[in-house]
Amino acid sequence: MYNQAVTFADDNHYTQIKARALTGLAELYREQQEFETAFSYNSKAIVLLDKIGAKCDLAEAYYQLGLTYQKMEELENSKENFDKAIRLFREIEAPKQIEKVRRAKENGGSNQIE
């Protein structure tokens, strides 16, 4: 489903939709312990979202990347990405999202799929 969304978004130049689908793929691959593939999809999404300035989706992508690093036990990289997500969520005044990231940061990410 996500792959179809990526193809559709590519064909129709829907950058933000493509990035969301890439973030979804990253989440699925992380849950399957395929961290390098997850990292690749997440990184592509971040580049696209940063380019178009979609702060909410960019923050979510950093959050998802933080969760991937956390599962890989790369805690410094995880913290760095969680902090980027928190900063962006603050900019758009999203307190519930900030709390979600803080909980993941503090408890090892047990609330990963939301």
Image (tube, rainbow, N blue to C red):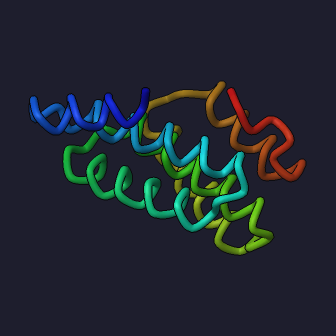
Depth check: 4 or 78 in front?
A: 4
Quadrant location of the N terminus in the rendered image: top left
Q: Residue at x 52, y 52 (%)?
A: 62
Measured along the vertical axis of the image, is residue 8 above or below residue 49?
above
Measured along the vertical axis of the image, is residue 8 above or below residue 67?
above
Q: Residue at x 74, y 38 (%)?
A: 112
Residue 29, horizontal then vertical, whole percent:
60, 49
Quadrant location of the C terminus in the rendered image: top right
Residue 74's quadrant in the figure?
A: bottom right
**Which residue is most to the right?**
107
Depth check: 5 or 90 in front?
A: 5
Residue 24, horizontal then vertical, whole percent:
50, 37
Q: Residue at x 44, y 55 (%)?
A: 41
Count of numbered tags: 0
**Which residue is most to the left?**
12
Depth check: 97 or 71 in front?
A: 71
Residue 65, visible in the rendered structure: yes
Q: Residue at x 59, y 43 (%)?
A: 27
Measured along the vertical axis of the image, is residue 98 above or below residue 68?
above
Q: Is residue 110 left or right of residue 41?
A: right
Q: Is residue 110 left or right of residue 97?
A: right
Q: Is residue 42 left or right of residue 86?
A: left
Residue 72, horizontal then vertical, whole percent:
75, 67
Residue 105, horizontal then vertical, whole percent:
78, 52
Residue 86, visible in the rendered structure: no
Measured along the vertical axis of the image, is residue 62 above or below residue 36?
above
Q: Is residue 7 left or right of residue 58?
A: left
Depth check: 94 or 51 in front?
A: 51
